[in-house]
């Protein structure tokens, strides 16, 4: 670590150095996590970097250019892509989704049935709008929520695992036959909304989602290692992926050398399909920190990003008041939701060091990022353990990063 560099950016280098010891002693030495990467920046300049553990289950050392499955950290990328189309007036946030997806014209809320009996006719209410997709207030769900007959129908259709199974059109056709959990706009539920949004990007742009990302986001940002398909020439850089087992060490669930990620994806999941690196995603975060600007180019307009990072929950509510999810990548207390990001609306209620307006998200394999526009801090954390709710590492990292801050802008 560059001690002078950290100090010049307003951090105590010794306190930042505690992160390495903490990760080593609490997660790597006991194999709770097999690999970690952490990159903390301020004003777009790196203040702290650490990587540890092994890239592969065979003990292959971790490397700086390791590739990770970033899962739901795909969602903010999809949200930026959609808002680029909004800026071009190809679509509006309050347009009905059925304008782009006519298959959704008769979609309504659950009115009974399911399981061993057919669903009752759907209750037609307020039509789903694009803003409902972006805020996860669409009435859609995830099969892994595992609470209702709607979730069960998602699992039966394998909608959470569609990479190699179905096309975008088939995905929408399947969804259109399953009732919504609730009338759009009435509640918040973590869902496949951003997958649907990604399909809308495809239909509006006439481009496969990965191609749109590459041309309009990844190439301008220099994100050369991010995409839906694993380049065979880069397979040796992909980290193995693990699943949590209570009372036992993590179980290998996707061996990099045999991963299906090297096969061309039939479905580009805008909600969770990307592979990336810490360096690449840091570029994306730096663009967000700089109000859409990156190295002289403008990915999204500042006012558009302001709109995206405002709380769009009704009445300024936080997720404790609106969420019916058993799982999401957000902390509920003091946290609202914008257009693709969780947003801190009451730092005190989060019970963590935070800034008003800070925004963030994470992925199912325990990856995470945050952007603090007040203190000008960004963090990218990479690892590969499912599910992300296993350990409180995101809270711990935030606490230690802010405890090292000596110069505040607030």
Image (spheres, rainbow, N blue to C red):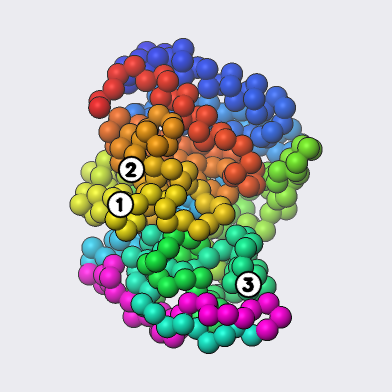
- Residue 107 in sight here: no
Disc 2/disc 1 C-alpha distance (Å)? 8 Å
Q: Outermost residue, right direction?
A: 248
Q: Quadrant of residue 163?
A: bottom right
Q: Quadrant of residue 25?
A: top right
Please, is residue 327 above or below residue 136 in the view? above
Q: Nearer the viewer, residue 162 or 283?
A: 162
Does label 2 or label 1 sit earlier along the sequence?
A: 1
Residue where numbered disc 1 is placed: 316
From the viewer's perspective, is residue 62 above or below residue 216? above
Residue at far left of view? 303
Q: Secondary structure at mark 2?
A: loop
Residue at 37% across, 33% down? 348
Q: Are marks 2 and 1 in contact (CB under 8 Å)?
A: yes
Structural distance between the alpha carbons of marks 3 and 1:
31 Å
Could you tell me which quadrant the C terminus lies in?
Answer: top left
Specify the label residue 358 is tagged with: none
Magenta stretch, residue numbers: 89-117
Up-down: is 273 above or below 151?
above
| Up-down relation of residue 279 to residue 185 (above or below) | above
Task: Give the residue at x 42% y 63%.
Answer: 187
**Residue 304: % across, % down:** 24, 54
User: How many residues crowd mark 3 within 10 Å: few (<14), some (14–19), many (20+)?
Assistant: many
Residue 107 inside the magenta-drawn segment: yes
Q: Earlier in the sequence, mark 2 or mark 3?
A: 3
Q: Is residue 364 left or right of residue 255?
A: left
Q: Which residue is mark 2?
A: 345
- Mark sitting earlier along the chain (3/1): 3
> Horizontal and vertical percent for residue 104?
44, 81
Residue 47, quarter of picture: top left
Residue that badge 3 annotates: 149
């Amino acid at each position: 670590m560059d001690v002078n560099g950290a100090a010049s950016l307003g951090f105590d280098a010794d306190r930042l150095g505690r992160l390495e010891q903490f990760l080593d002693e609490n997660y790597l030495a006991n194999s709770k996590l097999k690999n970690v990467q952490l990159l903390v920046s301020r004003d777009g300049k790196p203040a702290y970097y650490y990587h540890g553990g092994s890239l592969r289950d065979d003990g292959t050392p971790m490397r700086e250019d390791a590739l990770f499955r970033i899962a739901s950290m795909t969602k903010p990328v999809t949200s930026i892509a959609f808002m680029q189309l909004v800026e071009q007036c190809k679509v509006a946030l309050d347009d009905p989704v059925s304008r782009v997806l006519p298959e959704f014209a008769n979609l309504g809320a659950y009115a009974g049935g399911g399981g061993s009996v057919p669903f009752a006719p759907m209750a037609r209410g307020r039509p789903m709008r694009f803003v409902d997709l972006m805020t996860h207030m669409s009435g859609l769900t995830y099969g892994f929520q595992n609470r209702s007959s709607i979730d069960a129908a998602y699992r039966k259709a394998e909608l959470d695992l569609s990479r190699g199974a179905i096309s975008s059109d088939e995905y929408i056709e399947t969804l259109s036959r399953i009732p919504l959990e609730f009338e759009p706009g009435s509640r918040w539920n973590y869902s496949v909304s951003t997958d649907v949004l990604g399909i809308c990007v495809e239909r509006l742009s006439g481009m496969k989602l990965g191609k749109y990302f590459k041309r309009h986001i990844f190439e301008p940002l220099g994100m050369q290692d991010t995409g839906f398909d694993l380049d065979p020439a880069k397979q040796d850089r992909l980290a193995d992926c693990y699943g949590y087992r209570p009372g036992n060490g993590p179980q290998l669930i996707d061996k990099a050398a045999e991963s299906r990620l090297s096969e061309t994806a039939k479905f580009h999941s805008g909600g969770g399909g990307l592979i990336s690196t810490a360096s690449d995603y840091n570029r994306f975060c730096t663009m967000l920190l700089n109000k859409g600007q990156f190295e002289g180019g403008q990915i999204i307009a500042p006012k558009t990003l302001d709109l995206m990072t405002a709380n769009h929950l009704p009445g300024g509510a936080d997720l404790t008041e609106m969420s019916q999810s058993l799982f999401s990548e957000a902390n509920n207390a003091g946290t609202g939701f914008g257009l693709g990001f969780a947003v801190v609306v009451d730092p005190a209620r989060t019970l963590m060091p935070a800034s008003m307006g800070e925004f963030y998200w994470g992925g199912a394999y325990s990856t995470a990022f945050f952007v603090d526009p007040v203190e000008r801090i960004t963090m990218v954390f990479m690892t590969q353990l499912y599910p992300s709710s296993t350990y409180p590492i995101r809270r711990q990292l935030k606490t230690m990063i802010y405890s090292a801050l000596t110069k505040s802008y607030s």
